[in-house]
Structure formats: C-alpha cells, structure tokens
Image (cartoon, grey):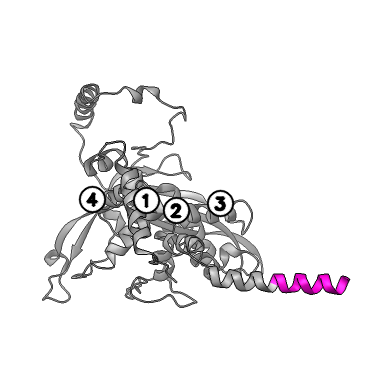
C-alpha cells in the first residue's frame, strides 16, 4: 500500500508549497549538489540503498530537495526510479573482484591479505570538533597536499591486489557447508508484488532496501534476545565492484565479450552464526551458518544488521517476530511505513465524526439508564 499527497483546497495547497520554498530560501544560502556529494557521503549512500537506485548525483539532489529529510529523499528517489526505462540487466557481480577500500574481521586477528581499516568513524572520539566551525579551504588544501604526498610515499612500491574471502579458508577446512551454484534468475520485487513465502532473492532485496533504522533495530532486537542470534563478523568489506552487461543483440556472451559500464561501491558482510545440530547418532554438535548482508555505499551497520536478519529468516521460528518474514518485510520499508504513518495527517473527518457520534450515543444512553 502506498500513500501519496492528496489534493484539497488548491489555494491552500499552493500557499503551503510557497511556504515550503520560503523556508528553504529564507536564509539566502544555497547548498550545491557538489557540496552534498563531497561532505555528506554516508547520507548519500543511505538514500541510494533505501531507494534501490545507485546514483550519487540524484541522491544528493533528492537530499537537497527534501531539505535533508531522509524519508522524503528516499521517497523522491524511488518515485524517480519508477519512471526510468530498463535497457539492460547486469551480469552477476562477484564480490571477490571488489577493489577493497576497507576490510576487517572480528573473527580472526590475522586474515589472508591483512586487515585494512580504511575510512571509518569506529576509532574516533565522539567529541564535537569545534575546529570545523572555522575551517577554511586553504587549510584543507594544505592538509590534503601533505596527506597525498605521504600516501604516495607509502604506496609507491605496492601493487594493487584483490583480497580473498575469509570464509573460503574455513570452507577449505570443512567447517562450512558448500552449496552448488544457483543460477536461478532473481525475482524483481520492484516489478512484482511480494508473495509469501518469499524466495532468497526476494529476501535479500527487501532487506537491502529496508529503512536503515528499522533494519538496525530488528537486528539489535534479535541480537539481545528476541531470537538470540549472536554472530561473529567474519568479514566486513567496503569497495568498488565492476558492473558488466551483455551486448543487447548477443545472447550468452563470453566473459571477454561483456561490456564494462562502471563501478558500484558496496558494503558486504558475512556473519558466522553458531548453531547446534543433531547428527545421525543423536549427538549435538556446533556448526556455523552464514548470515549475509550487502548494501550500496559504505553502510556497515545496516549490512551487519541485515546479515543477522538474513540468518533469522532462513530459520523461521514462530516465537520470535524477527524470524517471521511477513512481520519483518512489512515493517522495514521506509516509504511504506512513513507513508502509512503520515497518512494520519490527512482528513479523517467523516470516519472520526462517525466514531464521535457513536460515543455520544453511548454516553447519552448510559446517562439515561443511570437516572
């Protein structure tokens, strides 16, 4: 169910829109799209993820138009996405081909290729930096020049490399189950309504475009007891993956004949979840399952929470709402949930008057009976 604006009195609505424009312009400041792209990268990444459209420029435009409102920016970008033609379907992305910017594991100190901290707030002191109030472009240029010089010195003798997956080494020891490659075409939830029970491709689509706060909250709920899924992060990796498409007039093109159309920045998480299973001898043993999370941009908290919910939904349990796909999927969509809540602001005059009349009738009947 989707709610959109409902028109009432034309003059009143036009006046409201003028007031909205006034509130945006009254300080006589202009936020450039480039400024949003350059300084609000996490916000741009979050909007792209929830809107299911990878376009930093359009996400920044939506943020500007929405005045910084996340829910409105996602709504705008999803609405625009629905108008776009679809000319191609990209080939399946192999995240082992990711050009990694950040890669950490909470499961092992030493991992093949090493830990790469990259860019993150994880190690910062959460104190307000009042130097930002007076920063200048000149000071920033000086800092950048020194940093780039040092970076070039540190990296001059190193070759670019792609990092192997941590889980592959555990699979080689027989600690994780291996599965045959499934080439079943995924269902597109933006083209078809979700039908329960859902397939795996649908689960991952709904989770990755779910509202970041909602996905995080439900993942946290499961983590602290409502489902009791407590994983260890096998690997978090952030980086760019190449996107390829086939020639529009050639089917089943060879890998060398595919067309490279650009890169997409992703956050990918593989969580290791301990589970107790009974073997044929009825003896219980501890094994591990993988929870998977992936999201546009650098969106680590959401991807981790998604990996928790992924494992929950792969193991349904009637007692816990976080293991109920219908409960989870119908409550994490940003446009659906904010639209339904926001519709309460729209006129409900007739229905409320009906309830009010009923209450008055009951009240009058009760008073007369008491007398």
Q: Nearer the viewer, residue 192 or 14?
A: 14
Reply above or below: 335 against 303.
below
Q: Is residue 115 left or right of residue 277?
A: left
Q: CA distance from mark 3 to mark 4?
A: 32 Å
The residue indicated by pointer 3 is 220
Secondary structure under tag 2 reads: helix
Q: CA distance from mark 3 to mark 1?
A: 19 Å
Secondary structure under tag 1 reads: helix
Secondary structure under tag 4 reads: helix
| Circle nearer the viewer, 2 or 3 | 2
**Which of marks 3 and 2 precedes in the sequence?**
2
Report the residue at 45% width, 65% height from top: 336
Q: Classify the position of the C terminus by image quarter.
A: bottom right
Residue 174 in view (yes/no):
no
Report the span colored magenta.
359-371
Q: CA distance from mark 4 to mark 1?
A: 13 Å
Q: CA distance from mark 2 to mark 1?
A: 7 Å
Q: Is residue 360 magenta?
A: yes
The residue indicated by pointer 2 is 212
Label 4 Cα neighbours within 10 Å, binned few <14 / some 14-19 / many ≥20:
some
Report the residue at 31% width, 48% height from top: 21
The residue indicated by pointer 1 is 46
The residue indicated by pointer 4 is 57
Q: CA distance from mark 2 to mark 3?
A: 12 Å
Secondary structure under tag 3 reads: helix
Tag count: 4
Report the residue at 15% width, 59% height from top: 260
Q: Are marks 3 and 1 in contact (CB under 8 Å)?
A: no
Report the residue at 39% width, 60% height from top: 209
Q: Examine the image and state in which quarter residue 146 appears.
A: top left
């Amino acid at each position: 169910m989707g709610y959109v604006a409902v028109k009432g009195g034309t003059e009143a609505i036009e006046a409201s829109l003028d007031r909205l424009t006034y509130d945006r312009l009254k300080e006589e400041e202009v936020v450039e799209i480039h400024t949003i792209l350059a300084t609000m990268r996490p916000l741009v990444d979050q909007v792209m993820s929830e809107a299911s459209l990878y376009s930093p420029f359009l996400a920044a435009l939506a943020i500007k138009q929405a005045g910084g409102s996340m829910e409105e920016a996602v709504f705008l970008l999803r609405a625009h996405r629905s108008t776009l033609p679809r000319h191609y379907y990209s080939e399946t992305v192999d995240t082992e081909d990711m050009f990694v910017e950040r890669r950490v594991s909470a499961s092992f100190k030493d991992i093949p290729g090493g830990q790469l901290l990259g860019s993150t707030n994880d190690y910062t002191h959460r104190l307000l930096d009042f130097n930002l109030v007076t920063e200048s472009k000149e000071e920033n240029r000086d800092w950048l020049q020194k940093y780039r010089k040092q970076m070039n010195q540190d990296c001059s003798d190193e070759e670019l490399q792609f990092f192997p997956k941590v889980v592959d080494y555990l699979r080689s020891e027989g600690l994780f189950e291996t599965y045959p490659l499934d080439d079943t075409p995924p269902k597109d939830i933006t083209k078809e309504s979700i039908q329960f029970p859902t397939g795996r491709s649908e689960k991952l689509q709904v989770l990755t475009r779910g509202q970041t706060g909602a996905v995080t909250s439900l993942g946290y709920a499961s983590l602290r007891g409502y489902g009791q899924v407590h994983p260890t992060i096998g690997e978090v990796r952030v980086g760019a993956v190449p996107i390829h498409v086939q020639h529009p007039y050639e089917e089943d093109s060879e890998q060398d004949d595919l067309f490279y159309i650009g890169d997409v920045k992703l956050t990918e998480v593989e969580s290791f979840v301990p589970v107790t299973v009974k073997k044929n001898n009825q003896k219980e043993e501890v094994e591990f399952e993988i929870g998977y999370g992936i999201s546009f941009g650098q969106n680590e908290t959401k991807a981790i929470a998604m990996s928790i919910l992924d494992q929950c939904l792969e193991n349904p349990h009637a007692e816990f709402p976080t293991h109920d796909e219908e409960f989870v999927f119908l409550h994490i969509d940003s446009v659906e949930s904010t639209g339904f809540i926001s519709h309460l602001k729209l006129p409900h005059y007739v229905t409320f008057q009906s309830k009010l009349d009923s209450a008055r009738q009951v009240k009058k009947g009760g008073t007369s009976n008491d007398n």
